[in-house]
Amino acid sequence: MKSTQQQWNVGDYQQFASFVPQLGQPLLDLLQPKPGELVLDLGCGDGVLTEKLVQAGCEVIGVDSSPQMVEAARARGLNASVMDARDLIFRQEFDAVFSNAVLHWVKEPELAVAGIARALKPGGRFVAEFGGQGNVKTIEDALINVVSLCGFDGKALSPWYYPAPETYQAILAQHGLYVETIALIPRITPLPDGMRGWLKTFAGPFLKPFDELMHELLLREAEDRMRSVLCDKDGNWHADYVRLRVLARKS
Ligand code: BEZ
């Protein structure tokens, strides 16, 4: 999904981050999709979860800001279009808006929430999971510190927005979306292919100011800084995920 700066590579995503949609079942359970419902999958990516919504009998429109991801979703036979989360064009059409692992890329949450609220019918539900307060803190801190050492503003380069539940709940309420459940869910997540694949897939915006020769050096230094926390003595890496899971309803 669009993050102003992140470039998506479908192959890297499928190789190094397939666990992201695979861990989406609890969110589908929270949505409780019903046959015949019209659902917007916001940030559908390559369509792994969109397909599950279709299998549940829903009519689903997927949107994603990455043309490459939309192409991959269409290759599964899904109805998907390129659209930025901050510029949703829908008006009172959907029974539900569903979104997994996307909204932490949107640093202007009010724009996304306003569009989600407009897209829902009255009584429609918004069901989402994304990075919450403290998400991948060890990883983000290491990246910020390494690029800051090179004279760049690491915090400004970070593409991520990880709100506390109260903060997000207040934004939702300002747009007429009333929370039924919201919670931070710490989830230590194994990275079977190591930290490098994760960084390659997700940390591009931190490397933007540097030429390619520097990338290897920076990523190795960042890995060294997180190793004692995120890698066990046998070399198995994990990520310190904290998810924010929310169900809200339009009044
Ligand atoms: C994710 O898609 O799960 C994710 C990506 C970047 C940072 C944190 C989480």
Image (spheres, grey):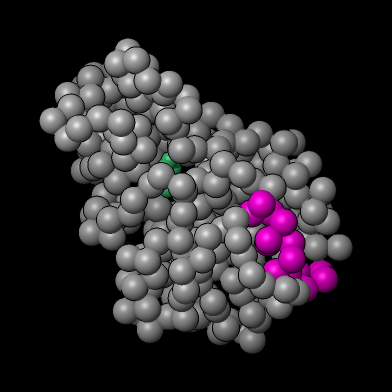
User: Magenta residues, as a range?
Assistant: 111-124
Where in the figure is residue 57, as x and y percent of width and height? 56, 84
Split into 4 quadrants, where in the image is the C terminus? bottom right
Q: Quadrant of residue 5?
A: top left
**Predominant secondary structure in magenta?**
helix
Tell me the quarter of the picture where residue 191 sits. top left
Please identify the residue farthest to the left as the structure is shown: 213
Q: Quadrant of residue 152?
A: top left
Seen from the viewer's position, the closer of residues 53 and 69 is: 69
Seen in the picture, residue 72 relative to 180 is either above or below; the reply is below
**Residue 106 visible to an observer of this rendering:** yes
| Residue 43 among those drawn in magenta | no
The x and y percentages for residue 38 are 64, 80
Identify the residue shown where x is 72% and y is 73%. Answer: 91
Describe residue 44's horizontal placement relative to residue 77 as left or right.
Answer: right
Tell me the residue at 56%/58% (across/down): 85
Left or right, 60 with reference to 250: left
Instruction: Examine the rendered structure and indicate whether residue 4 appears above or below residue 69.
Output: above
- Of all residues, the one furthest to the right in this rendering is 251
Residue 56 in percent (x, y) is at 54, 79
Quadrant (top left/top right/bottom left/bottom right) for the N terminus: bottom left
Residue 155 is situated, as x and y percent measured from the top left of the image, at 47, 24
Q: Which residue is at the front of the view, 233 or 75?
A: 75
Residue 126 in sight in this render: no
Is residue 119 covered in magenta? yes
Q: How many marks?
A: 0
Residue at position x 18%, y 27% from top? 214
Q: In this view, does 129 lie to the left or right of 211?
A: right
Is residue 142 or residue 237 the one in the foreground? Answer: 142
Q: Quadrant of ligand 1?
A: top left
